Amino acid sequence: MKNTGKNTEKISRENILKNSKEIDGISIKGYNFNKGVNYEGILDSYLSTGFQASHFAKAVEIINSMIKDKATVFLGCSSNLVTSGIRDIVRYLAEHKKIDVFVTTAGGIEEDIIKCFGDFKLGKFSASGELLREQGINRTGNIFIPNSRYVEYEKFMNKILEEIYDEQKRTGEIISVSEFIKILGKEINNKDSILYWCWKNDIKVYCPAITDGSTGDMVHFFMYKNPDLKMDIFKDIHDLNEYTTTRKKTGIIILGKGIMKHHICNANLMRNGADYAVYINTGEEWDGADSNARPDEAVSWGKIQQNKGEAIKVFGDATILFPLLVAKTFAK
């Protein structure tokens, strides 16, 4: 029995105290607050912190490589982020020509315009939907949006739809969604708007789901009297794909999830993949949804380049991470 005990101890010790090789690379260390509060230093320390902090630091490196290589930058943004203060970060990028292509969903288009008619307000996630409905307040997370903003949007939109419709009847020309978005940016004529600066700086804006929101509602109402109103949804995909194939280097930045992510990635498939990619979202890939997938899945499809492509996904909330990312990249 004693021998058996000794053998068990020996095996257990060998398993637990197994020798290992030394590893080259970055040592794990956090920020030393004995040096005082230095926000630049705190962000720099993320690289050696581990977990998603190190993914964030890698995202900084990749975006700075995009900038250094003069890559064509594709920014994708889910509409809820335009609802939030991230709208102002994206507006900064468009104003200073830091991006070349912007892709969002219908809410990202219309809420950029709607914010020009009045502010959205900070509320609570826990607010009663029933009570808010009685007050005419729409809730997106903990952001409150008075429905009167959409009333103003309908007035703005009807004028533009009338002009588009009259031009369509006069010339027979059917405009594309991106051409429609350019008109919105020009007509809003507001320096707080992403679309205004995209129009001003000739930044391409695409919305593959333009009718999925208030804009679709306005078109629906308009077509009661003008049922033959048309808009070309095919032209944009051809233009985006053709544009992407002519780029020497491309970098994609995806904030959030949804159709805009695949729209950008699939366009880069036409050139055998993007050179750089940074995703920021909270999605897990167990359900197989493209929205949640890591960059490696896009590599398998040829949407991000194999071997030489640099890509990272940062799991987290873009409202926290993206301003810090811009501070360490485009704003510098």
Image (spheres, grey):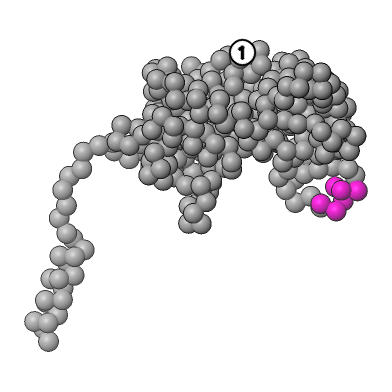
- x, y (%) of residue 8? 15, 76
Q: Is residue 34 left or right of residue 24?
A: right
- x, y (%) of residue 132? 85, 47
Q: Nearer the viewer, residue 34 or 306?
A: 306
Residue 90 visible in the displayed image: no
- Image quadrant in which you'd find residue 140: top right
Q: Categorize mark 1 by other alpha carbons within 10 Å: few (<14), some (14-19), many (20+).
A: some
Q: Which amino acid type is shown beneath numbered disc 1? A: Asn
Residue shown at 52%/51% (left/top)?
289
Q: Nearer the viewer, residue 193 or 215?
A: 215
- Image quadrant in which you'd find residue 17: bottom left
- Image quadrant in which you'd find residue 310: top left
- x, y (%) of residue 278? 46, 34
From this viewpoint, which residue is outermost toward the left? 3
Residue shown at 39%/38% (left/top)?
302
Establish if 96 lies above or below 245: above
Residue 131 visible in the displayed image: yes
Element under disc 1 = loop
- x, y (%) of residue 148? 88, 34
Q: Is residue 146 left or right of residue 204?
A: right
Question: Is 130 contained in the magenta span?
Answer: yes
Give the magenta-colored segment's residue range.
129-134
Residue shown at 16%/52% (left/top)?
20
Residue shown at 90%/44% (left/top)?
135
